[in-house]
Each structure stands twice: as structure tokens, then as C-alpha cells.
Amino acid sequence: MLGLWDFVLIFVICPILGALPLVGWVTQLLTQGKFRRIPAGKIGVAAAFYYGGTPVGIGAVLLEAFKGIGAVLSVRGLLGTVSGWELVALAGVVVGRYGATRTVGTINAVWGLFVHDPLVAACVFVLTAVSFSIIRSRQAAKFGVLIIFPLIVAILNPENGLRIGGAIALSLVLAWMYNQSPNIQDDGISLNYQELPSGGNNLFRRDHRILSLDEELSPEVVGQKAAMLSQMKRWGYPVPQGWILFPYDDPQLLFDYLQPSELSPLVVRASPVFEEVDGAAAGLYAGVINVTSQSALQAAIAQVQASYNSPTAIQYRRDRQIQDGAMAILIQQQVRSVYAGVAFSRDPMTQEADAIAIEACTGQGNLVTSGRMTPEFYRAFVLESGNTSTISLQGEGRIPPVIIKQVAYLTRKIESHCYGVPQNIEWCHDGQTLWILQVRPVSTLLPIWTRKIAAEAIPGMISPLAWSIHCPLICSVWGGIFALILGERSLGLDFNEAGRLYFSRAYVNATLLEQIFRRLGLPAQSLEWLIQNTELERIPWDTLFRNLPGLFRLYGRELFLRQDFHRDRHRRFAIAISQLSQEQRDTLTPTRLLARIDYVLEVLQRATYYYVCVPLSVTFRQRIFRVKDGDIDYYRTPDVAAVRSLYDLATSAKNLLTEFDPDNVYEDLQVSQEGQKILAQLEDLIKKYGYLTATGADITSPTWSEDSQPVRQLFMQLMLGNEADFGRQRRRPWRSKFVQSRANLKGQVAEIYARLIAELRWCFLELEKYFLQSGWLQQPGDIFFLELEEIRQLLHKTETHTISRLQLLAYQRRSQYSQHQQVNPVPRIIYGNHPPIFATLMPSLSPDQVLSGIPSSPGYVEGKVKVLRNLQAIPENIDQQTILVVPNAEATLTPVFARAGGVVIETGGRLSHAAILLREYGIPTIVNVQNATWILQDGQQVYLDGTRGILEISNDLRPG
């Protein structure tokens, strides 16, 4: 029988020993912080060899061996004899390692077995070597060992059931892990790790074999392009066969294997390693088609490798702040395409609901991506209904509609496989099969913004001033919560980008939340849940285990929320509110008012912590104790308490006036003494809750003390309505008391938060009076259309140009706010940083003043024309006031175009490489403006609208 300490050692300490990231810690130490930004648990033996060199790799092997040996010797020392419990302890080490790092601890098991029973280990080694020399299958040999091992233990120890059982248990554990992760070989030697720096040690390459797209590939090793095509192949999509040449590897083995010819040509493509996902780098690196000989293959590989260090590529990486990495080479069988093109799973320009943008041509697809010709353009809509899909097309051309529909269907399916992230797909059709040539995220449609969470917290419209106050406060609190859970894993996350204002409504950064979810280890489809309302999978146990330290820290905060709040209420909030109420705002100077605003914001910073955390605590306790919403009484929440008090007054008035005219209620109440008492109580109620507004804690809306009309209207409606008890008489289950205390706390927090917001509003109104008297603002309410920092500028920088600029800004934002009120419905999802433009928001132009083309990169710019008919002679005097007009655009010239304010191109489509890169740079662009280089003249003043594809020519400089 096992004693208590024996049990603790085998089933608790050994799994913890396996989970310890010793390799990561030592590798970080020996590589002088090279891996500091990577969690230690993600650095395995293979990574240590690959990037740390042989000494670090050998040290990693010894550390993992130490875990297995240490587990065996510890159990032996405690039990005093060799037993099968040593094998069970080994299984515990392996389980702990897998749970923490998702890698199979083969090294732990092998070395532990050698110490446990050298004879068994030797027999297993010999039989495995013999069988492998015959079978020549690593996978078969691996599982064969797991069968041979317990058989040998049984043969050598036929009467020791415990050892046989331990051997079977260890084999079953390893077999299950190999089955769960078939790509992981001995201790993760398949280099299945993430976010490692570039460069590597050639001593530990993949056993010098040819790697193909049939295998599971890591983008950190072979680049995003090759890894994504490998993923597509494993998902069952038709991808031409391909092979990978690692950076710095000798290509001779590949030369000996591949035999290109006229009948079987190859295509050589770049797959940059550690290229950022947010940057497409479309067309910047060379690609060579029609490779038909060994010599041509060698030259093509050299050309593609050299393109990584071309001036254009270097400039692009510098502009996009991309770390230099390396270049893997992807060599594929070339498809003899009849039709080819590009598809975007979301239209990058219009973002119209579910529209798929497709450009196509006959022949090779590089005609589309190069922008040298204008392709046929189609828009497709995929409507899912049960198990069937209906596809409607917009656009006509020479490409058979059935092929375009097939492209649309495949494009939407690929986006769904990629968890709702918009995808850019290059495709071709050989007359029989539709082939996928490349898949990558649409960089300009990231990040993805969603109303799903924001609509619950801020349901209506919000002014720029209110947003500039609320957003930093709320984002900092949420950032602190996630940092508390993630610990070091939160490094690199910019929580200031968690929210943004579009159409005067709040949107949440779903892409950032997906990154947070991924670091938490939540299911991969978390982003799809955020943007498409799908069901979220159950959280895996290993994820819960990995996040336990952070969750315990968060739970500790939750337990002491009430005590912390009451302490802060007495030490901060009550004192602040008392001081603010005693000071007369209308006697303060503008400088004192700004100081008062800063003081309120300082107090509000702490109040926001409770404003966010307490509702989370209520929800958490509701889920734990399974309490329904109707079983919670929110009587402490100010607006609920105010309505209840108002209802009681209305009931008293209704009882007093058995019959009344709604238009003369207040006059009728004035007649009697009891009626006058009710009216006095109504005034007291308005004064008591004077900090409330009709739309919650909104700094823009008038408070009850400023405008009591909504309260009086509500009083009248309650008099006309039926009786209600507001849930006060309802019997509630005993479990609800565990939630009710937090609901009461939520009400107290809401009161303080609303009071502080009201104080801010009153301060800004006093400031606005001063600005209006000084002529710095034009009309009441303008201050709410300036952000907080702009108000500071208006007060401290009284130069005429600053005042004029801010006046114009307030006017424009007020006008936009009014236009945004007409947007219905508001987009649920916004892709990228440029929201779709609705027809109601666009000014009209006279037809004789414009040239039109295909909108390619959104934005507006005014400048002077510079016509370049010869792209070899590009002048140096190109600046943000220049509108370049060119016949066509190669992607390699994009960094040059980026110096201009806007670009007009005679040919090409919106999905060409140049168009994609110009969208990344944010340069307004129109393509397919026919004869633009001959119609437009140098020096003409034009207005370029890249959103609608319109170029307006100034009247006084139109060509004669």
C-alpha cells in the first residue's frame, strides 16, 4: 500500500516536475535573453538545438532526462525498492509535460526507463532498431515500441503484475499523446513552437530530408505562405504539390529529387519567414514560373532568395517595422491554367454585407496580380440555408459563371475554416479542377471591430468628448484584468487599442480579444464567436490548469471587492464628492475648472475599476449559483431607486385624484395641501437624483437637475399606467443572497460613477460658457465634439490658427454626428480601420467635373497632378501634395508611390498586388481610369476620392 507521501510524490509532485519549463529557463539564460519575449513553456528541446546551438541543445536533453531519472530515483528512494510505481511516476512526468507544453515527453520516458530497468530498455532498443530497419516507417516504429515495451516487461517479470500494469499505463499514455499530436515526434523535434527569432543552427536540421506540403508545417520555420498552403492541403482543398527549401539549406538534395521539364514545369515562390501577418508584402518578392530545367531551377531559387534583400523589400520592411528574418523557398508543380484570378472573402472597399470580391482573367493569374491589365470583376453573395448554399453573382464576362460561383463558395469556406478572418485567395482553373495557389489574411481588413460587446456596455451614440474620457479609463481597467490573468503572456498586447468609435458608436477590437483568448489557450474559434455569434466550445481542462494562477489572483480580487470599495468610498469617493459639492463652479476661472476636471478624472480612474469589476462579479456569481435575473433586486441602483420612488409618488397622486386630465395634473395637485406635498416630494426627488440623465452615465445628455421634463413625463406615464410591484413582493430562492450582496454593491458603484460623470459635465458646461464668450466656440454643445486634449489646447494655445482649426473640427464632427444618426442599421462588424461609406454620407458631384474608375484604396486627398508615362524616370519632388498618374503599377514601385498623396492608375484591379500594398500604406488610389495619363496634365488641381473611385478636376485648371 502507498503511504500519503508516496501518493503525493507519484501523483502530484511528478506531474509538477514534468510541467516545469526547465529547458525554457536555461535556454533563455544561455542565449542572453534572446527568447525573453517567448513564454518559457514554448521553448522545447528542438528549439534549443535549432537556435541555441549544440551546447544549449545537449543541455536541454540532459534537463529533460533529469526529470525522468529524478522521478524514478525519488520513488525508489521513498519506497526502498524497485517497483512498478516508478513507471507510474514516469507516466505522471509525461502527463505533466504534455499538459503544460502540449509536447510528448519521450526523452523523459526513455531515460527514466534506462534507470528503472536497463535490461528492459536494452531489449526494447534492439528490437526497435531491427524492426525499423525492416519497416522503414517512423510512425509504425513509434507505436511498435509502445507494444513491444509492455510485452518485454511481462516476459522478464511474469509474476510482477504491478510492473506490467505500470508499463501498460505508460505505453497507453504515450500512445494517446502521439495520437493527439501526430506531427510531434520525439519531444517536439518537429519544431512545433511559436514566435522564435530568426536565424538558426544548421546542425539540427530536419534529418536532411525533403519537406513537402503534405506535412504539418510551422510558419515560424517555413514562412506563412508555405504553412498556410500545407494547412489548406490537410483541410482537403486542392493545392498543387510543393516542396520546401529551408533558409540557408543546401538545395542539392532538392535538385536531385525534382526533375522539371517542358511537360512538367515548376514554379518557384518566396515564403518569407517571420513576415508579419498584418502586412501582405504582396508582390514584393520574386516568383518565377515556367521552370523547365535543372539550371533554370537553380537560377530561379537564387533570384527568389536575392529578392528578400532588394531595396524595395528592405524599404517595405522598414516602413512597416517588420523584423528581418529569412526566406524559405516554395517549389510547386505549375498548373496550366485556363482561368485564374484573385478572390477576397470580404470586399476590401465596400465591406458590403457578405460580399465576395473576385477578379478573374483567362490564362495565368499573374496578369491580375501584376496590375498590367484590367481583369473582369465579380461580386458574389453566398447564402447558407441548412445544408444547401445559394450563390448570386453581380458582373458579367467571359469566365463561365459556374467557375466564379465555385471560387466564391470555396472562398467563403476557407474564411470559415480561418475562424472568420477575411482571406485573400489566389486561384486558377485548369479546365477540370479549381486550384488554390495562395491564402493569406487581408491585412487591410484587420483588425476586426465588433458591436457585440460594446453595444451592451454603450448601446447608443456617444460624443467625441465622452469617448475620449470613457475609452482610456475602461481600456486601462480591462488591460489590468487580463494582465492579472496572463502575467508575462500579456506582453506586447496594446490594450489602448481595445475600442474605437465608428459612426459615433463604440466598437470593440475583436482581433485583440482573439489574441488574448489565444494566449489564454481558449478554443481557436473564439474570434468566430465574437463576430458571427457561433457557440463557444467548452474550455479544455489543460487551459484551465495553465491559467489557474492568474484566475486565483483574479478570484482574490473578487472576494475582497466589497471591502476594497467601502475603503475607497470612505477614503476617496465620499471626500471627493463632498468637496466638489461645496465648491461653486460658476465662480471658478477656466484654469481652476480644468484642474477640477483633472481631479474628477483622477477619482474616476479608481471608480471605473469598480464600475467594470462589480458587474463581472455579479455575472460570475449568477453563473456559479445559477440565479436568474428576475431573482435579483437592483433597488440600490440609482435609476431603479429613482423610478420606484417616482412610482410611489405617482400612486399617491393617482389615489388623490380619482379622475384627472393629463394636461392639468400639476394644476390639480396644487389645489389641495396633500397635492402640494406630493409636488414638493417630486422636486426633492429631482434634486436628490439630479445627477442622473435620461441615457445613463452620458456626459453629453442633460442631467435631471438641468432638464426635469423627462422626469415629469415619466411621472405622468406612471400615473396613467397599471399597478406594479417592481419585483419587491417576489419570493426569491435562498441562493440569490450570494448574488444580491454584489447587486447592492453594483448600485452603490453606479451612484458614485454617475455623480462623478455629472460633475465632469457641469465643469465642461462652465468651460463652454467661457469659450463662447471669448468667441473660441461657435454654438452651445460644441465642446462635446472636441476631445479632452483638444479642449486643453483650446485653453492653453490661444493662437488664431489653433482656434480656427478646433472650431472647424467641432463643426465637422457635429455634422458627422447628425449624419451618423441616419445610419440604419449600424454595421455589426467593421473590417480594418476604414469603415464603409454609406450613400447618405457622400456629397454629390457634377458628372462633367469628374473622371471615374475602380475604387482601390479608400481616403480623400487634394493635390496637384504629376503624370508619369515612363515609370523608369521617377522624379524626386514627390510629396503628400502630389497625385501620381501612371499607366500601370508594379508592386515593387509601391514604396515610391507611398511618398505621394494619392495615386491614379490607368489599368489594373482593386485586388492587384499594387492595390493591396497601397491600401496598407493608406494611400487613396483609383485604378482602371482609362486614358488618365493623356487626359490629365501636370499641375492640375484635383480632388481624389479613393472610396468611390472618383477624381474631381478643379474648374480653373481643366485641360483645354
Image (cartoon, grey):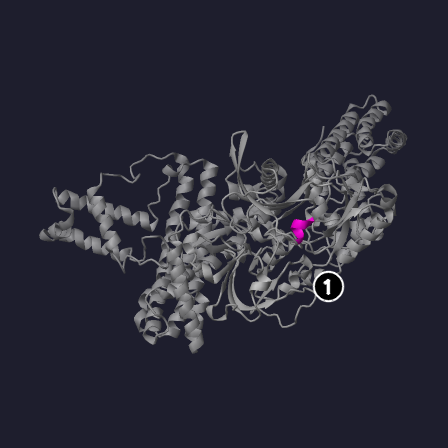
In the picture, measured across the screen, residue 24 lies left or right of residue 451, that is right
Q: Quadrant of the N terminus?
A: top right
Please state the horizontal and vertical placement of residue 434, each as a whole percent of the image.
67, 37
Residue found at x 41% / y 68%: 808
Which residue is labeled 1 in the image? 311
Residue flagged by tag 1: what amino acid is it? Pro
State whether residue 17 appears in this view.
yes
Closer-to-camera residue (701/235): 235
Tell me which secondary structure the magenta stretch mostly adopts: helix
Residue found at x 62% / y 64%: 898
Highlighted magenta segment, given as a residue range = 366-370
Closer-to-camera residue (722/438): 438
Q: How many marks?
A: 1
Please state the horizontal and vertical placement of residue 799, each as a whole percent of the image.
43, 78
- Locate residue 785: give its quadrant: bottom left
Residue 866 versus residue 679 in the image, above or below = below
Residue 461 among those drawn in magenta: no
**What element does badge 1 sit on?**
helix
